[in-house]
Image (tube, rainbow, N blue to C red):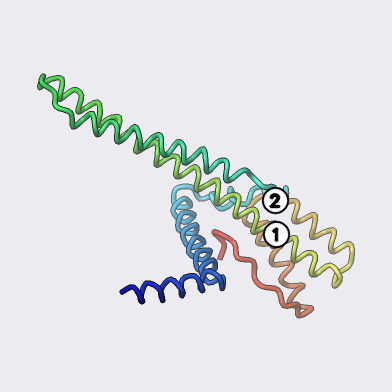
């Protein structure tokens, strides 16, 4: 059993070192992101447009990790209150009526806390997806514009940059990517497809 753990540990470390783990994790998170987007789109058809509404402004880093810290603190605080309420609920109460009232109050408070946690999850997931979507779109377009620039006229390049800066929804994003793909195909440039959340 010990030797099995050792071998497994070596394989795991080798996988992490080779980048396999990072690749797997990235694809898995991408898959989860698309599930969230499909669910959100079911309730709001313009959700994908919302994700790419700021692409034309270029990518600007947002403070994801400070936001994550605030989120985790809020999460921990809410869970603490939840377990505190559970503990109070289990305490013996001599007065039966008071016990019933206390139980009902605690149940309502628990429901409120669970609702707060759910809303926090939704807001933070949207924040992360919005940031990642903008990053992927902006870096993907800018890299491709740099690649095709020597193969097109300055006017054409300026036109594409203008189109890039006008992006504020999914359709405009797909339009410029189509234009760029036509150029890369024409000049047989080996450029990988931009992998974007919510866009096939």
Vertical order, 179 against 170 (above or below): below
Q: Are marks 1 and 2 in contact (CB under 8 Å)?
A: yes
Residue at screen point 50% across, 48% down: 125
The answer to which of 157 and 34 lies nearer the viewer is 34
The local crowd at label 2, few if under 14, some if 14 to 19, many if 20 or more residues have their Cα within 10 Å, is some
* Quarter of the image with the C terminus in it: bottom right
Q: Secondary structure at mark 1?
A: helix
The answer to which of 76 and 157 lies nearer the viewer is 76
* Quarter of the image with the N terminus in it: bottom left
The answer to which of 175 and 143 lies nearer the viewer is 143
Please identify the residue farthest to the front as the structure is shown: 2
Residue 66 sits in quarter: top right
Residue at screen point 75% across, 66% down: 144
Vertical order, 97 against 142 (above or below): above
Left or right of 21? Residue 83 is: left
Residue at screen point 69% across, 67% down: 178
Could you tell me residue 21's position as x and y percent? 51, 68
Q: CA distance from mark 1 to mark 2?
A: 8 Å
Q: Which mark is residue 139?
A: 1
Could you tell me residue 8's position as x and y percent? 41, 73
Q: Which mark is residue 59?
A: 2
């Amino acid at each position: 059993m010990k030797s099995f753990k050792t071998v497994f540990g070596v394989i795991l470390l080798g996988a992490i070192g080779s980048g396999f783990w990072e690749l797997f994790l990235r694809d898995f998170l991408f898959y989860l992101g698309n599930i969230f987007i499909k669910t959100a789109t079911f309730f709001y058809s313009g959700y994908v447009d919302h994700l790419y509404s700021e692409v034309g402004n270029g990518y600007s880093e947002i403070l994801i990790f400070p936001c994550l810290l605030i989120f985790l603190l809020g999460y921990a605080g809410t869970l603490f209150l939840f377990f505190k309420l559970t503990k109070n609920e289990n305490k013996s109460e001599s007065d039966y009526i008071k016990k019933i009232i206390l139980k009902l109050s605690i149940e309502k408070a628990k429901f409120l806390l669970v609702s707060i946690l759910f809303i926090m999850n939704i807001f933070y997931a949207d924040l992360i997806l919005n940031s990642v979507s903008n990053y992927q779109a902006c870096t993907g377009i800018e890299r491709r514009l740099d690649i095709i620039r020597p193969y097109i006229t300055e006017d054409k390049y300026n036109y594409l940059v203008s189109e890039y800066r006008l992006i504020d929804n999914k359709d405009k994003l797909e339009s410029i990517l189509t234009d760029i793909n036509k150029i890369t195909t024409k000049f047989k440039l080996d450029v990988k497809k931009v992998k974007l959340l919510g866009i096939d």
